[in-house]
Amino acid sequence: MSDEEVFQELRAMCAKILAVDPAVITREVDLRDRLEADSLDMAELAAATEDRFKLTVDLDTAKEARTLTDMVALVQAAA
């Protein structure tokens, strides 16, 4: 799966989980500061990512992710 395809999938998941318009979710938007994702939101996003991409996300590494660029890199590294 290309980076763009992974980004689009993650963008849709973030929009649903955070209840925001997908248009505000760019590759570099800070999920915690700008979109106010809390630790439960991030855990839900990690679980959804595992389910969607059939991989295991290391929670310590996932905690460091702040943008969708970070998340795309995690998915691509685990694939």
Image (spheres, rainbow, N blue to C red):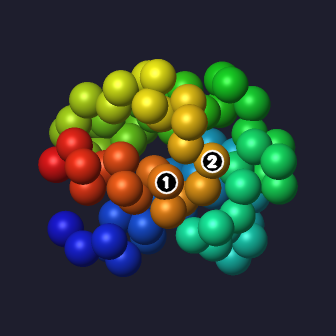
Q: Residue at left 33%, top 31%?
A: 57
Q: How many marks?
A: 2
User: From mark 2 to mark 1, how far is it between C-alphas?
Assistant: 6 Å
Horizontal side, residue 17 vs residue 24: left or right: left
Closer to us: 74 or 42: 74
- Residue that badge 2 annotates: 66
Amino acid type, residue under disc 1 in the picture:
Asp
Q: Return the residue at label 1.
A: 70
Q: Residues within 10 Å of mark 1 (few under 14, many from 20)?
A: some
The vertical placement of 54 against 21, above or below, is above
Left or right of 65 on screen, residue 57? left
Q: Residues within 10 Å of mark 2 (few under 14, many from 20)?
A: some
Rendered location of residue 60, percent (x, y): 47, 22
* Residue at point 36%, 47% (across, down): 74
Picture coordinates of residue 75, whole percent (x, y): 31, 50
In what element is the residue under mark 2?
Answer: loop
Residue at figure coordinates x 56%, y 36% from the top left: 64
Residue 76 coordinates in the image, percent (x, y): 26, 55
Name the secondary structure under disc 1: helix
- Quarter of the image that includes the N terminus: bottom left
Answer with the quarter of the image where residue 43 lies: top right
Q: Which mark is residue 27?
A: none
Q: Which sits in the foreground, 69 or 41?
A: 69
Q: Is residue 19 visible?
A: no
Q: Nearer the viewer, residue 75 or 20?
A: 75
Q: Residue at x 82, y 48 (%)?
A: 33
Give the residue type at disc 2: Arg
Left or right of 26, for residue 11: left
Using the rendered image of the protein, determine whether residue 7 is visible from the camera's viewpoint: yes
Dots 2, 1 in contact, CB < 8 A: yes
